[in-house]
Amino acid sequence: MFGIGNTIGAGIFALTGIAAQYAGPSLFISFIFSGCIAMATAMMYAELSSRIPINGSAFSYTYVTFGELPAWIVGWNMNLRYGMSAAGLARGMNSYFTGLLVKSGVTVPSWMIGVTVFGVEKCSILAVLFLAILNYIYCRGMEESNTFNLVFTILKLVTLCLIVFFAFFKFDIDNFDPFVLEEEGGLVGTLFASSIIFYGYLGFDFITTLSTDAKNPSKNIPIAVKSSTLICMGLYILTAVSLAGMAPLQDFNADTAMADAFSAVGLEYTSYIIYLCAFFGITAACFTNLLVSHHHIPLLFLIFSCISYIELT
């Protein structure tokens, strides 16, 4: 569940619309291709985690293979990557949360949208509070963290399945003609789209950073890495097929293609589900990123809070 929680985030809402501009109805082929590449990488992580069943992921593998200095560089790079991801997700949560309130007819105070601090506009206080709450939950212990991640991951999967269900409800096979976009190079565009959505698969490596928290790391960690990648791949393919069959995603704005597609077929009420799914997805993904980056250095939370305070562009 940690792997799924870290992998499926808000990226699927943004990346799906962008990739559809190049792949069109063949978007699910892009997900299959990038999923196979991700699985090949996941298999390498699974092999290393079975041979070196200790915390640290790439840091530990580099330490054992190349020594202390390369491992130190890789370790700080990992902290930066997970921390920056958490900050960016926290900033994105502010947009989705305020958007959901506006959609519900609630008057949103200006400070929730953004404030000016030291001349920097659109700073997000909510993003900092969001990180503080998640950090508090993490500090409560691994058992509480696991429960929190489990709840939000399940909620995220349920709402994502609802999106797929409503999309299939309006499914029309004619939307798959033409199957590829000739103006984007046909199959070349489909392969290019797979390079974009590959980022949606990142997260399986997170599992190997918590090896010592597993009962049998050498056995359980490889299984978790491979199974989480396969589950995410299946969900992505279902989402791509259902959305492409509902409406031509390439005809809509890349950033809001999913919501626009539902509105085009008269299912505007599903936008609430999309907002909720994005909120659950951001929360689970942000929490797991903080879990890794704080695993050894809790003070990094202060740095990430400052980063999230400023609008990331």
Image (cartoon, rainbow, N blue to C red):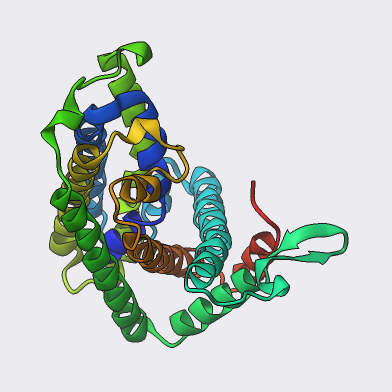
Residue drawn at point x = 21 percent, y = 62 percent: 162
Residue drawn at point x = 30 percent, y = 15 percent: 188
Between 221 and 81, the residue placed more toward the observer is 81
Between 52 and 182, the residue placed more toward the observer is 182
Q: Position of residue 196 (x, y in %)?
A: 39, 33
Q: Is residue 114 visible?
A: yes
Residue drawn at point x = 30 percent, y = 52 percent: 266
Q: Position of residue 253 (x, y in %)?
A: 46, 38
Location of the N terminus by quadrant is bottom left
Between 117 and 26, the residue placed more toward the observer is 26
As drawn, 121 above or below 46: below
Q: Is residue 64 visible?
A: no
Q: Position of residue 44 (x, y in %)?
A: 24, 41
As drawn, 181 above or below 226: above
| Residue 284 figure quarter | bottom left
As drawn, 13 above or below 118: above
| Residue 225 figure quarter | bottom left
Residue extending furthest toward the front = 266
Label tally: 0
Q: Position of residue 173 (x, y in %)?
A: 12, 33
